Every structure is written in structure tokens, then in C-alpha cells.
């Protein structure tokens, strides 16, 4: 596998030689030392994006042009890997949910045997009311406690009901 710094360095050297310029000319124009530019061109040093942009300005090209040529070079030297086998596609089918009881009282959650959700008509439409049945354990903290309803508080302090 070819390292990106080697590919970029090779492109920089090729562009500089194509223009017929010396290391010294480009290094002075980019504001880097000659040995450092030489190391970058040989792929020994990995230049920062700022240094690469300065070298590109010195060469009179855009950074995107440098990266496009590096991409083309990488595509030529990279071995083409066969496509990974795809995982078997799974189709999810809707599962019919059991119909709730026809009565107005519906139990919510297996851990809350005494908590009931009562649905009944209200002045503005149907309402939900939380209550306790007679079989609820005595001494509990009430029907609206988080333990009974399986509720938790989120960071925004909203209550969320979870099936428990």
C-alpha cells in the first residue's frame, strides 16, 4: 500500500520538474527550507495542510489540483480489492399487535400489577387517567411514581413511558 505522503511528494516533484524549477526556487517562494521541501518530495516528511498550500501557491496551482493528481496516482498503484460480499438482506414484516381489551381499563406493564391507565371521554375529547386498582401493594409511593409506571426523566425533564 502506498503512503499518501509519498504520493503527494511524487506529485509535487513532478509538477516542479515539469515547470523546470529548482528546489531552491520553490522552497524560497513557499517559505520553507530546501532540505524540508526535499524531504516532502521524497515522502519522508508529512507536510501540514498549510505547508502544502504554500508549496502549491509557489508552484502556481490550487491545492485541489495537487490532491486530484494524488488521487489519480493512488488509483493506479492501489490494488483493486474485490467487493466485499454483501450481508444477506433481511426484510422486516409488520407484526400484528394484539388488540387491547375492550373495557376502559388497560393494564400497563408486567411490573405494575396495580397501575391502571383509564381511557375515558373528557370535555375536550378522550382523556387518559392514571390510577391504582385495589390489588396494588400497600405503602407504595403512588401511581405516578417512576417505579410504578416505568418512567424515567430525561435531561429535558420530560417524562417518558417505557414498556417494562
Image (spheres, rainbow, N blue to C red):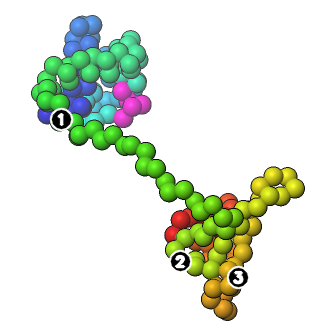
Query: According to the image, label 1 marks what residue?
Result: 84
Residue found at the far top of this picture = 19
* CA–CA distance in space, label 1 to label 3: 56 Å
Q: Position of residue 87 (x, y in %)?
A: 23, 40
Res. 111 mark: 2
40 above or below 138?
A: above
Left/right placement of residue 41 relative to residue 157 reads left
Q: Position of residue 152 (x, y in %)?
A: 61, 69
Please identify, in this view, whether the residue under mark 1 or under mark 3 is nearer the observer.
3
Query: Quadrant of the rendered structure where residue 18 is?
Result: top left
Query: According to the image, label 3 marks what residue?
Result: 142
117 above or below 122?
A: below
Considering depth in this image, is 15 or 94 the residue closer to the camera? 94
Q: Main secondary structure of the magenta part?
A: helix
Q: Position of residue 53 (x, y in %)?
A: 40, 24
Number of numbered callouts drawn: 3
Query: Quadrant of the rendered structure where residue 34 is?
Result: top left
**Magenta region includes residue 49:** yes
Amino acid at each position: 500500500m502506498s503512503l499518501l505522503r509519498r504520493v503527494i511528494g511524487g506529485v509535487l516533484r513532478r509538477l516542479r520538474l515539469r515547470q523546470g524549477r529548482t528546489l531552491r526556487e520553490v522552497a524560497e517562494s513557499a517559505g520553507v527550507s530546501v532540505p524540508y521541501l526535499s524531504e516532502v518530495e521524497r515522502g519522508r516528511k508529512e507536510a501540514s495542510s498549510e505547508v502544502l498550500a504554500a508549496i502549491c501557491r509557489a508552484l502556481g496551482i490550487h491545492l485541489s489540483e495537487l490532491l486530484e493528481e494524488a488521487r489519480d496516482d493512488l488509483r493506479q498503484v492501489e490494488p483493486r480489492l474485490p467487493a466485499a460480499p454483501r450481508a444477506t438482506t433481511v426484510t422486516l414484516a409488520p407484526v400484528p399487535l394484539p388488540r387491547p381489551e375492550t373495557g376502559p381499563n388497560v393494564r400497563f406493564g408486567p411490573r405494575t400489577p396495580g397501575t391502571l391507565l383509564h381511557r375515558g371521554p373528557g370535555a375536550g375529547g378522550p382523556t387518559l387517567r392514571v390510577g391504582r386498582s385495589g390489588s396494588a401493594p400497600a405503602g407504595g409511593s403512588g401511581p405516578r411514581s417512576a417505579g410504578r409506571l416505568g418512567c424515567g426523566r430525561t435531561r429535558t425533564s420530560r417524562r417518558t413511558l417505557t414498556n417494562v
